[in-house]
Image (cartoon, coloured by chain):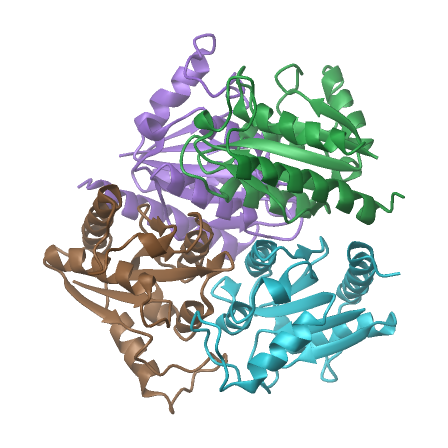
Chain colours: A cyan, B brown, C purple, D green
C-alpha cells in the first residue's frame, strides 16, 4: 500500500506543503509507504489537452508515482475560492488510468476565514475520474497562525483532525482497495 | 465599454477558443470594443502566490487588459469536471484590483455529455473576487460536432443562445457599470 | 421598488429570521418597500411537481408577493451543509414567472464554523431560474453567539457587512431592473 | 446487509421513483435486503430544527429504517438545478446517528438536458453527515422519454449504468462496512 501526496502551491514556505507533510507523516506512522510529489521541485508544463509531453520527464514521473499509488492526499491553497491552477493543472495532466479508483483525502489552506469551496471542487473532480474521497477533510483558515516555526500545528483539536484524517485514509484505502 | 475574452485551452484547434471567438464577435457586432487574450500566444508562468512576475511581461499585459475591461468572457474546456488549470492559473495571477466589479459571461466546452460543473466553479470564483456573472451561460457538449470546418456553430438553437448571451452581457455590463 | 425576504427556518427563535429582519430593516432604511414572508406563519404544502395548489391559499400569497418583487433576500439555516428543505421547497413551489430576473441577496446561518455551501447552492439555484445574485453574501457561523437578546448583531464588522449587503442589493436592483 | 431507497418526488407517476425502483430491484437481484421509503405514502412534517416529532409516527419509521441500513439510494428530481425540497427536508429530519457511515448511491432525474447539479449537492450533503457516496452516479435527462409504459429503461446503455451502479453500491457497501 502506497499513499502519494501532492501540494498545489509553489510558494517556498507554503503552508499547504506544511499541512501535506504533517498528513503524510501521520500516514507513514501507520506503517504505510508514502511519497510527496513536490510541484515546487518538478518541472511540469501547462496541460495542452494532448498526450505527448516528451519534453517534460517530470510528467512521466508524475504518471508513474500516481499510477503506483493506492491512495492520494491533495493539499491546495484556496485561491479565489477554488483549487489552485497549479494543482488543477497537475490533475489535468493525468487521466483515468492514473486517478480512477484511488482513495483520496483532501486538504485546503487559506489566509482568511475557513471555507470549503476548494475541498468541494476537489471532491467533485476526483469523483469525475472515478476516484473515492474520504468524508474526513481538512480546511485550515488563517493559515499564517496555524503552524509554529518548526512546522507543528499549534491547535490541539486541529492536530487531532489530522490523526483521524490519516487513520481514515489508511483504513479505507485498505478496505476499498482490498489490501490485507 | 470594453469586453475582454480569455480561453482556458492551449490546444491549437481549441473548440473553447472557437466558442470564445463567436461570442466575442457577437459582442463586437453590438458596437462594443473587444479583445481576446489568447493564452496560446502568451507566456504566462504558474502562479507562485506572490506579486512579482517581472520576468514575464505577459503578466503585465494580462493585468492591463483585464483592468481596462468592463466585462469579461471566460471560456474553458471542462477537464475532469472542472475549470482547466490553465484558465484557473490565469485567474490566480490576477487579484481584486483586476477582477472585482467586472461583469462576466461564462462558457464551457467538453467532449462528452453536457454538464455545468465548470460553469458553476467559474460562477463561484468570480463571485469570490466580487465580480458579477450573468445568468445566461453556455455549455457545449460533444464539442467535436458543434462547429463546421469554418468555425460556425451548426445547431441553430445553440447559435441563438450565443446571441442572447452577447446581448445580456452587453446590456447588463452597461447597467451594472453605469455606462450610458 | 420592492424587496421581499424569505427565511428557511421554522424555529420559533430562528437566527435565520433574526438575520433576515436585520437585512430587511436596513433595506427599508434606504427608502425601499419591504415585506417578509414568514414561513413559520404560512401554511405551505410540499411541492408535488404540479401546478394546482388550490387548497393552499398561502401558495397564491407566496406567488403574488414574489412576483411583485424586484429583489429578494433569501436567508437559510445551513442544514447538513446545504439549504434547508423548508426554503428549497418554497422555491420549488415557484417558477420562472415568479423568480426570473429578480436580484437576490443570500444569507446563511449555522451553529458551527462558518461555511459557504448553502450560499453556493442558493447562488446556483437562483441562476437556474434566471435570477441575479449580488456578490455580497453573508454567512454567520456560531449563530448562537451572533445576536444579543434584543436581536442586534454583536460584532461590529458583521453589522457593517449587513450595511454593504443592503446597499448593494438596493443599488444593483435599481440598476439591473432599470428603476429610476 | 440492507439498502434503503428514498425518492424526492411526490408526483404520482414520478420518474424519480421509477428510476429508484429499477436501482433497488437490481440491488435485490444481487441478494441484498432492500426497502423503499416512499415519501408519497409517508406523512412527514417540515423539519423545525428540533428533535421532537412525536405527532408524526412516520418520522420514527424514517429514523428506524435508515438507522438499520448499511447503504442508501437517494433519487431526486432536479428542481431549479438542485435537490428537491421534499428530499432535502427528509434528510434534514435525520442526523449523524442515522446517516453517518452509510454508503450511498445518488440518482437525479430531470425533464430537460442532463446535468449534475443535484447530484453534486447530494454528494456534498452526504459528506457533511460523514457518509460515503460511490463514484458511480446516474443523471437521467429528458426523463419523459427514458422509460417505456411498463417502467423499463429504453436506452440499453443507461440500463447498463444501473447495473454498474447497483454492483458498485453492493460491493463497496460490503467493503466499507466490513460485511463478509
Q: Position of residue C126 (x, y in %)?
A: 40, 40
Q: Along the line of sight, which residue is nearer the eye, C43 or A77?
A: A77
Residue sticking out furthest to the bottom = B55
Quadrant of residue A50 in the image?
A: bottom left
Residue sticking out furthest to the front = D156
**Position of residue D139 in the picture relative to residue D59 (left or right):** left
* Residue B101 seen in this snapshot: no
Q: Along the line of sight, which residue is nearer the eye, A178 or C77?
A: A178
Question: What residue is shown at x 56% (from left), y 86% (from top)?
Answer: A57
Question: What residue is shown at x 77% (from left), y 65% (from top)?
Answer: A162
Q: Position of residue C132 (x, y in %)?
A: 34, 44
Question: What residue is shown at x 63% (from left), y 69% (from top)?
Answer: A75
Q: Along the line of sight, which residue is nearer the eye, B174 or D174?
A: D174
Question: What residue is shown at x 67% (from left), y 43% (from top)?
Answer: D126
Vertical position of residue D80 compared to residue C136: above or below = above
User: If the image is split into quadrants, where does the C terminus of chain B sit?
Assistant: bottom left
Vertical position of residue A103 compared to residue C86: above or below = below
Q: Along the line of sight, which residue is nearer the eye, C133 or B144?
A: B144
User: If the image is split into quadrants, where does the N terminus of chain B sit?
Assistant: bottom left
Q: Position of residue B109 (x, y in %)?
A: 37, 56
**Position of residue D107 in the picture relative to residue B95 (left or right):** right
Amino acid at each position: 500500500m502506497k499513499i502519494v501526496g501532492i501540494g498545489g502551491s509553489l510558494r517556498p514556505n507554503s503552508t499547504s506543503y506544511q499541512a501535506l507533510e504533517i498528513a503524510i507523516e501521520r500516514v507513514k506512522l501507520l506503517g504505510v509507504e508514502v511519497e510527496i510529489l513536490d510541484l515546487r521541485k518538478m518541472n511540469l508544463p501547462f496541460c495542452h489537452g494532448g498526450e505527448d509531453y516528451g519534453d517534460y520527464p517530470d510528467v512521466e514521473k508524475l504518471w508513474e508515482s500516481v499510477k503506483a499509488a493506492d491512495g492520494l492526499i491533495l493539499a491546495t491553497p484556496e485561491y479565489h475560492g477554488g483549487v489552485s491552477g497549479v494543482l488543477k493543472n497537475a490533475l489535468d495532466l493525468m487521466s483515468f488510468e492514473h486517478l480512477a479508483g484511488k482513495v483520496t483525502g483532501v486538504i485546503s489552506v487559506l489566509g482568511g476565514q475557513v471555507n470549503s469551496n476548494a475541498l468541494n471542487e476537489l471532491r467533485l473532480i476526483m469523483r469525475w475520474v472515478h476516484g473515492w474521497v474520504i468524508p474526513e477533510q481538512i480546511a485550515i483558515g488563517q493559515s499564517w497562525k496555524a503552524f509554529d516555526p518548526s512546522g507543528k500545528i499549534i491547535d490541539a483539536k486541529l492536530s487531532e483532525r489530522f490523526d483521524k484524517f490519516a487513520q481514515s485514509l489508511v483504513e479505507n484505502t485498505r478496505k476499498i482497495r482490498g489490501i490485507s
